[in-house]
């Protein structure tokens, strides 16, 4: 039987709509509920009083089908929960360039009111788009899943998106926190547990759940080709051509000639359609192909550089670090070790 609590419990609202990521939702609920309990259970000691009171809440409190058709029963309605201390918006599954889900407009007033009442409001992954729609992120730095960062920046230019960051506390008192990809729920949970329950509890939760912060950021997970959709047929044809010819010595000049445009005209038209210059687009194609080769072959880095169109290996290394956020050699090691071997210290 747990000891009687002597500190206020953190009333935590995990907000859900049908497109919310179910695995993220329940990982967060379980991890927060286990603070002060599971470590003690594993070591045969008396549980501590709960620190968090997490609840899965929706607009109407009724069961819903998630994106995979599973029936999910929430704990109740948002408006019946009262003033929360902490709000967590999980990842939301929908295409980045589509209209915002209808539930956003209904949830926004509740989120704004919760924050005004003193709650810390947080998001995981694409949940930052809902947080952005409330206006609470205006003028602040924020992060999201790499595929949503540009979309959020375009729709909400007042927000300073940092696509390479995994976790960003922001605003007065750091009462707004955004986390990167869906697996960054672990980074967010460790941050919240450390901030609210103390660093020792965060360390214990990390060991119970085998969580490690993504200290290297998320750029190396990103597909560099998640560009904006457009309707310029000539530019689209140029992109298709570039996908097969990026390794040429002067691909931009050849692209312009193929399009029947001067390089300056191509630059202007390409940038308007895609948001990138032709040079940047060629670079992303080269780096994306290099990433695939680093993941799937044992080819030396010097040969990969030559294969994707770089005459100088040093130029390739510099470009790779700039676009991916780490050296090519480190990227190869990380991507070939997708399932890390956990040390005895981590699990002890």
Image (tube, helix red, strand yellow):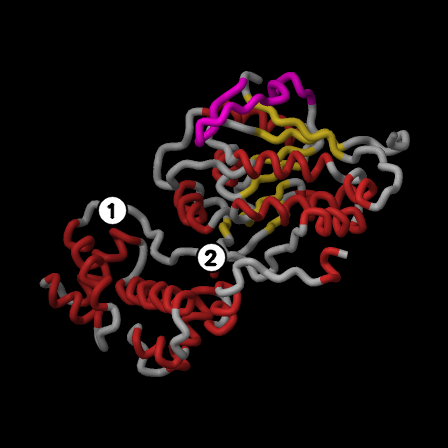
Which image quadrant is residue 6 in? top right
Cα separation between marks 1 and 2:
24 Å
State the image coordinates of residue 5 (x, y, percent, origin top left).
Answer: 87, 31
Q: Is residue 26 left or right of residue 331?
A: right
- On the image, numbered disc 2 is attached to which residue? 221
- On the image, numbered disc 1 is attached to which residue? 230
- Specify few, some or many for label 2: CA neighbours under 10 Å numbering under 14, 14-19, or 20 or more: some
Instruction: Tell which circle, 1 or 2, labels the residue nearer the N-terminal end.
Output: 2
Number of numbered discs overlaid on the protein picture: 2
User: Does the image show residue 346?
Assistant: yes
Looking at the rendering, the stretch of residues picked out in magenta corresponds to: 63-82
Task: Assign the N terminus to one quadrant of the image.
Answer: top right
- Specify few, some or many for label 1: CA neighbours under 10 Å numbering under 14, 14-19, or 20 or more: few
Label 1 or label 2, whichever lies nearer to me, is 2
State the image coordinates of residue 301 (x, y, percent, origin top left).
Answer: 41, 78
Q: Is residue 188 left or right of residue 195?
A: left
Q: Nearer the viewer, residue 281 or 76?
A: 76
User: Does the image show residue 104?
Assistant: no
Q: Is residue 147 left or right of residue 188?
A: left
Asked if residue 81 is among those painted magenta in the image, a careful observer would answer: yes
Q: Nearer the viewer, residue 124 or 85?
A: 124
């Amino acid at each position: 039987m747990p000891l009687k609590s002597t500190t206020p419990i953190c009333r935590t609202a995990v907000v859900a709509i049908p497109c919310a990521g179910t695995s993220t939702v329940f990982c967060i609920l379980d991890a927060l509920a286990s603070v002060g309990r599971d470590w003690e259970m594993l070591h045969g000691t008396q549980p501590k009083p709960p620190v968090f009171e997490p609840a899965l809440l929706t607009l109407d409190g009724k069961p819903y089908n998630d994106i995979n058709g599973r029936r999910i029963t929430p704990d109740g309605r948002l408006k019946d929960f009262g003033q929360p201390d902490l709000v967590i918006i999980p990842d939301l599954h929908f295409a980045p360039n589509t209209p915002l889900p209808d539930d956003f407009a209904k949830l926004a007033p509740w989120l704004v009111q919760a924050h005004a009442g003193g709650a810390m409001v947080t998001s995981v992954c694409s949940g930052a788009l809902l947080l952005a729609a409330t206006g609470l992120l205006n003028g602040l730095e924020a992060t999201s899943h790499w595929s949503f960062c540009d979309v959020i920046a375009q729709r909400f230019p007042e927000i300073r998106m940092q696509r390479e960051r995994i976790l960003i506390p922001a605003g007065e008192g750091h009462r707004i926190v955004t986390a990167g990809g869906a697996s960054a729920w672990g980074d967010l949970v460790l941050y919240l547990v450390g901030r609210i329950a103390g660093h020792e509890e965060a360390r214990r939760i990390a060991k119970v759940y085998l969580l490690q912060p993504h200290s290297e950021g998320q750029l190396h997970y990103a597909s560099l080709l998640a560009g904006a959709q457009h309707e310029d047929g000539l530019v689209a044809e140029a992109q298709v051509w570039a996908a097969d010819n990026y390794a040429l010595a002067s691909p931009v000049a050849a692209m312009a000639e193929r399009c029947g445009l001067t390089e300056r005209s191509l630059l202007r038209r390409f940038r308007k359609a895609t948001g990138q210059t032709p040079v940047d687009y060629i670079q992303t194609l080269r780096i994306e192909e290099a990433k695939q080769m680093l993941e799937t072959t044992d080819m030396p880095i010097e040969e990969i550089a030559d294969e994707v169109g770089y005459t100088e290996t040093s130029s390739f290394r510099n470009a790779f670090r700039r676009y991916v956020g780490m050296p090519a050699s480190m990227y190869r090691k990380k991507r070939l070790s997708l399932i890390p071997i956990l040390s005895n210290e981590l699990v002890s």
